[in-house]
Image (tube, rainbow, N blue to C red):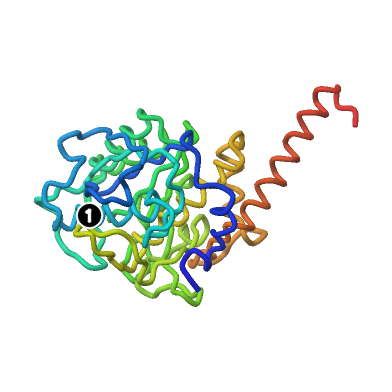
Amino acid sequence: MTPLELVRLPPLMARTSGSPAVTIGLIDGPIGQHPDLADTRRQDVGLPDGSACAVATSAACRHGTFIAGILFARRGSIAPAICPDCTMLARPIFAERTAHGGGDVMPATTPNELAAAILDCLRGGARILNISAAIAPAALRAERALDEALGHAADRGAIVVVAAGNDGTLGSSTLTRHPWVIPVVAYDGRGRPLGASTFGGSIGRNGLGAPGEQVTSLGTADQPVALSGTSAAAPFVTGAVALLWSLVPDASPAAIKLAISRPVPGRRHTVVPPLLDAWTALDTLQRLHTRRRWAHLRQGYGGQA
């Protein structure tokens, strides 16, 4: 079973490749030149001098290009290419000269840097934010700035999808605890959560699982790259949100979030979130949308059936 099949994305992808009106803020590393990204609707925000890869072999550039491929690569690419016709707002937060690690390591940023990136994307009109980053320890004041930025995203109805982390522990952060955020943990090809993911009460309650074991996407040397972890998992949820909004463009942010986040009824009492089911989410969204239109119609007739 492919990663896309695991979360039932192919039926949505058969209906749409995304809408240019759905703008995704990609808060990650710089994005390298790749032929499969040549036709991407891309805008750079925030840091124009860091929007392109200066060092293609850097961890920051590899990471940004990999995540961009999952979402925006052309259909038929080696990458999942979930929503290539959506608009990308590229906002790098990993400096190439300071990003360390490789393989499955999540690059880290500070709460202040991430807060600034979130606000830049919101000013650019982002409707969805994808954040595949670890948060370095910081002072309480910096964490407050991040919490306020997430509050601005909630006020504007911009859905925030974040990688839960790869610490293999129970825990949370300012980022994954925020009630508007959808934290994402990694699942293997058999639909089981990877033990290296970070789990916790807020993650289990508000989050989702998505493919995160040896996901193949674009590399910076024209060679495909396979990575594991929650960084790879998060864009599958982001892409599903983007396709749902493309198929039901006048759906409210609350309806989109409700549809994608409740594959099982009732309140969750677990530290492990359920696996994303994109096809069920579309069915739920359409039913919610039909009820909303019917309610508006009844109001227009003075509450008479």
Residue drawn at x 43%, y 49% as measured from the top left: 161
Residue 122 place in picture, x, y as percent = 38, 32
| Front-lying residue, 271 or 54 | 54
- What kind of residue is marked 1? Ala
Report which residue position mark 1 lands on.
108
Residue 103, horizontal then vertical, whole percent: 23, 68
Query: What is the secondary structure assignment of the residue under circle 1?
Result: strand
Image quarter of residue 220: bottom left
Outermost residue to the right: 305
Residue located 52% across and 58% down the image:
205
Residue visible at 55% across and 59% down in the picture:
10
Q: Where is residue 131? Give x, y as percent.
A: 35, 49
State the residue in front, 79 or 141: 79
Q: Residue 173 in the image: x percent, y percent?
A: 35, 54
Instruction: List the single residue furthest toward the left.
Output: 97
The 10 Å Cα crowd at callout 1, few under 14, some 14 to 19, many 20 or more, is many
The quadrant the C terminus occupies is top right
Against 177, residue 51 (above or below) is above
> Residue at the location (58% across, 40% down)?
254
Determine the image quadrant of residue 226: bottom left
Which quadrant would residue 184 be assigned to in this image? bottom left
